[in-house]
């Protein structure tokens, strides 16, 4: 198999998917991973727990795609039909695999439980198929090749529907097997870079051919609540070679859009970047949110006790904070910063109302983002921010963090704004 | 068409779906709605922007399902192939519909813009098809019947991929047309009830046959972060008949699980129930969250200025609140309640750390939920709460609201707990 010309289909199995009881997130995740391997996903199919429907869907998929990755239907109950459907499609009987059965026994023993008899079915495999080891659960995966009438083959990988198990099995076993199937041993390595402060289409324009499908290494772009992630996926003969590709691609990306970059890593967000900067300085932070959200408090609180975050305050209006602190409204923010013993304060004034938005994007409106620095100087900026109700508060909170990072980064004398005296 | 025996397929169109760039939530929403109409969804298919693949998928769907609802591919660009693919599948040419073109012109005129020439293609329909009016956007939907070789027909409804447009067009046009296709005029009405305080499987057991597929009217169960929704979907000859079915079903549900019920409506959450109770009393609330989350502040803040919510406070430890208020730690909560001029205070002590959870469910651990009432009495309870990291904080916040609702509901003399003196 030569990845660059391979196509794939992702199949999701279960009545809970076709009925809409559960949202299928596996298909999206698998499609991205397959794309990173250089394989174009051309179809997704979802099918309920009906044997004939499963057989039909597997056969159609194997005829039109070189790689088929399916999830679900590997449990121990009568609803779980994937093993039988695969056996029917490749026209082979099921046989018991002792190694798989031993692993299932081992998992039950570890939990001090007897294995129920029905779980034995999870160790049944179509003759000629390979196991896919599942370190976390009792459902091993199945790796079987379907011989097409034209003499070519389609490789079917069946994984459990539980996302954590599915993801680990794909990364640890399925991806390496796909990479090795070309004959030569090949590695894949990923690196994620995070950006804030620009729209997706502007970002795409600035990156140009770097995010084209045929760029080596592949650079994938995704957006989540106004944070842009670039995922570099390098394939090469060694991990070292992959790292070299990633290094040079990362450097080229930094040249083009470096001023928007705030950190690296899939889970790395702006509040982590702020936390890191404050930890290095040995300084701490409080947040004040006026209006209708507490996203900053929610983010910083998640960092836990050892963080530099002193606390979060959320009010409809600044006057209410003053009442609680028993001070003038004009001095409320600075009073709070001092009482909390924090060097820095970040505030949003204010999150807009969504009451009449009717699920439509809000037009851009001015929001004041305020930072108070360790000297008590108030540094504020007006940002024009809009967007869909589902993301507008996160976008505003992130804009406040971008402003805080800007103030933290610029040497005081060179700040582009005019600090005013502390209120 | 007789709904009870009909099957449906949902088709999602676009490279952004097959590549995994975008998560498909339309298929889930449509599957639920079709289920409520009594139609079993047997397959979902997702296909990219390739004409022949679209034709293949439509034909396969029309041959195996009585109703096909597809989303996407109705835009004005060359990537948008749904109109052409439908025309090819039913073997009819495309023709311009003046009514659709007038609507598109009208939408551009309303925004003071000239219609670009390419948008004209959105008014093209296969000969013999019906329009589906799109009140919000320039892409009308297409409703066309495919004649199967056996003489029966499959009805294909093509809708835009934009969720807000798709949902409104389905509810306003597609669902009524499906209901009318049986000959008799039929209505559908929905009613959503909300519950907290029990797991999904316990809830299912207590509801028994009420949530069976063949129950009349249909009752669907969904769970979101420990909140359970029951959606009653009644089909009948008149709206009045539907409401009667809903009333009697609602009463039966209340008999079985009424003590867990906190309100009605798709978007109604426990914080709305608390807001309603406090508004009726003319009383107000502050919240304090210790540990690593601010979900209560985030929920109540979203209610806006006119709410009974005075503010939210989020700290690692109670001692830090005392420092800010310049009072004893033992008196911090009560001091805060008084300074805020609020009758009620709700506090969580504390949200657990997720640091070593490794994406696995957290074991149940004690969390103290505290309410202070208008007399200053402290009413606290210990809840053993666990769950997946992605929902544990919301579950704890919701348990705190359930405790607050309990205290608000019970007459003071009959409270099962022992109020202690205010700290």
Image (cartoon, coloured by chain):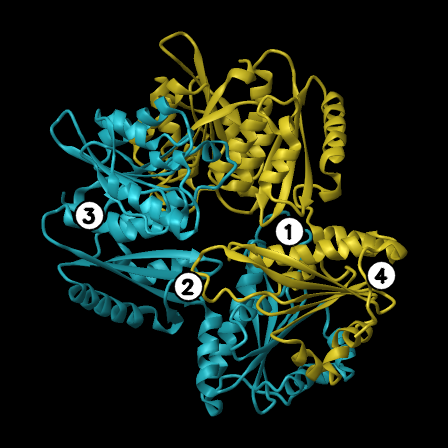
Chain colours: A yellow, B cyan
Q: Are marks 3 and 2 on the same chain?
A: yes
Secondary structure of the residue carrying numbered label 4: loop
Q: Are marks 3 and 1 in contact (CB under 8 Å)?
A: no
Question: Which quadrant: the C terminus of chain B?
Answer: bottom right
Nearer to us of marks 3 and 2 is: 3
Q: Position of residue B298 (x, y in %)?
A: 58, 66
Indicate left or right for A194 with B225 as reference: right
Nearer to us of marks 1 and 2 is: 2
Nearer to us of marks 4 and 3 is: 3
Is residue A52 in sight in this rendering? Answer: no
Label 1, label 2: how far apart the Cα atoms are:
31 Å
Relative to A22, say whether B338 is above or below: below
Nearer to us of marks 4 and 1 is: 4
Q: Earlier in the sequence, mark 3 or mark 1?
A: 3
Report the chain holding disc 2. Answer: B
Tag on residue B357?
Answer: 1
Residue of label 3: B177
């Amino acid at each position: 198999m030569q990845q660059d010309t391979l196509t794939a289909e992702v199949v999701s199995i279960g009545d809970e998917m076709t009925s809409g009881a559960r949202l299928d997130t596996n298909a999206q995740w698998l499609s991205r991973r397959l794309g990173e391997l250089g394989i174009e996903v051309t179809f997704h199919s979802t099918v309920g727990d009906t044997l004939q429907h499963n057989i039909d869907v597997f056969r159609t998929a194997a005829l039109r795609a070189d790689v088929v990755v399916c999830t679900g239907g590997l449990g121990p109950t009568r609803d779980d039909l994937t093993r039988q459907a695969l056996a029917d499609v490749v026209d082979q009987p099921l046989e018991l695999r002792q190694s798989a059965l031993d692993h299932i026994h081992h998992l039950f023993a570890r939990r001090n439980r007897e294995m129920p008899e029905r779980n034995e079915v999870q160790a049944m495999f179509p003759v000629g198929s390979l196991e896919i080891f599942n370190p976390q659960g009792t459902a091993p995966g199945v790796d079987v090749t379907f011989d097409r009438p034209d003499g070519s083959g389609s490789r079917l990988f069946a994984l459990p529907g539980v996302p954590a198990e599915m993801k680990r099995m794909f990364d640890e076993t399925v991806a390496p097997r796909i990479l090795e199937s070309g004959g030569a041993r090949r590695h894949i390595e990923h690196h994620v870079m995070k950006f804030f402060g620009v729209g997706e289409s502007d970002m795409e324009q600035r990156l140009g051919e770097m995010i084209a499908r045929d760029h080596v290494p592949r650079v994938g772009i995704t957006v989540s609540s106004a944070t842009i992630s670039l995922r570099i996926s390098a394939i090469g003969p060694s991990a070292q070679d992959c790292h070299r590709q990633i290094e040079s691609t990362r450097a080229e990306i930094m040249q083009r859009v470096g001023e928007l970059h705030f950190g690296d890593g899939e889970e790395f967000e702006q509040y982590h970047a702020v936390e890191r900067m404050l930890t290095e300085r040995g300084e701490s932070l409080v947040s004040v949110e006026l209006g209708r959200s507490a996203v900053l408090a929610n983010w910083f609180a998640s960092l836990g006790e050892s963080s530099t975050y002193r606390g979060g305050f959320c009010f409809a209006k600044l006057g209410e904070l003053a009442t609680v602190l028993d001070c003038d409204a004009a001095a409320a923010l600075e009073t709070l910063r001092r009482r909390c013993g924090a060097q820095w304060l970040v505030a949003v004034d204010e999150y807009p109302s969504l009451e009449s938005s009717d699920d439509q994007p809000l037009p851009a409106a001015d929001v004041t983002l305020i930072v108070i620095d360790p000297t008590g100087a108030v540094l504020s900026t007006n940002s024009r921010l809009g967007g869909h109700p589902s993301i507008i508060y996160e976008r505003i909170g992130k804009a406040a963090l971008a402003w805080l990072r800007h103030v933290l980064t610029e040497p005081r004398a060179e700040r582009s704004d005019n600090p005013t005296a502390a209120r």
